[in-house]
Image: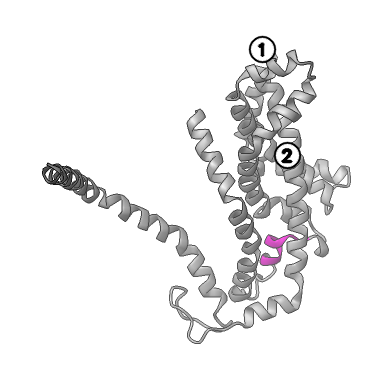
Amino acid sequence: MKKPKMQERGTVLYQEEKEKMPLRLKDWWKYLLGLGLVFLYLFPFYVIINVSLKEFGDTSSRMQFPDPVYWGNFQKVIEAGDIFVGIRNSVIITFFVLLLEIVVGCMAAYALARNQSKVNEIVRSLIMSVMMITPLTILVGVYSTMSKIHATSTYWGMVLLLSAFGLPMVIFLYTNFISSIPVALDEAAAIDGASNFQIFFRIILPQLKSVTVTVIILQGVGVWNEYTYSYYFLQKTEMRTITLVIKTFFSAVSNDYGSAAATAVIGMLPLIVLYLFLQKYFIQGQVDSAIKS
């Protein structure tokens, strides 16, 4: 009696596997599209690494792998020492910009998400409208104001400037996330005697880990790669960021593409390391946002 049952079970499993096979064959284009996207994203990295390993006088195609491999560009950049100054300045500015954006952004978002009023609706609309303004269009006015208060070539000036441009997006992200947190949690804590500050720091803030990591990655990359405002506001040599250090290899006389590429490769390493450490929370934040939306 057991043998026919085993045969029936095997037949059922075979039919299920057989039904799955056509589905897998139909999905071939998804794998092909995925490989195409991987190639598209990795291609710029291949080109810049390729260029960084070529000599100054190498006129071969940037697509062609260097033969022999030339490590002199990295040695030249490291021995000059300017790249370490650029990384130091970029780290300081990026850290304090993110700190200011996260602290101010999440607290402002909590007030906007929890207090539903006409005033808050107007404020939210203004924040959305500010996001539509291109920073380059107000460069002249901003530079004039910053010059009057002696904020050029200073850390605090760049931190305030970049934070002002990044806060609307940060507030927008935090507001949408906090709005998805049940208000019942706030009400239960208020019944127990908790103040608004206690509710925020003990109930709301611990739940913002994933969206905070998203802010760190998105805004951090933007601040690290910022060039236009840094070029006009950081005029002292010792205040150069990593993007301004890369710019020094280009002039009207000659362009040292190899050294510039080597500097860019070294400058990317902190961001890559940061993402590797935070990718778990970043992906979880994207999943949570998709589920709650």
Front-most of residues 206 and 235? 206
The residue range painted magenta reads 240-246
Front-most of residues 255 and 122? 122
**Residue occupying image coordinates x 62% and y 54%:** 277
User: Image quarter for residue 264?
Assistant: bottom right
Q: Residue 257: x and y, percent? A: 59, 73
Predominant SS of the magenta segment: helix
Q: Residue 234: x and y, percent? A: 78, 56
* Extreme residue toward the bottom, this view: 68
Relative to residue 139, is residue 210 drawn left or right? Answer: left
Front-most of residues 74 and 30? 30
> Mark on residue 118?
1
Identify the element where label 2 is drawn: helix
Relative to residue 42, is residue 183 drawn left or right? Answer: right
Q: Is residue 23 magenta?
A: no
Alpha carbon distance from label 1 to label 2? 25 Å
Q: In the image, what residue type sits under mark 2?
A: Glu
Q: In the image, what residue type sits under mark 1?
A: Lys
Decide: is 61 above or below 231.
below
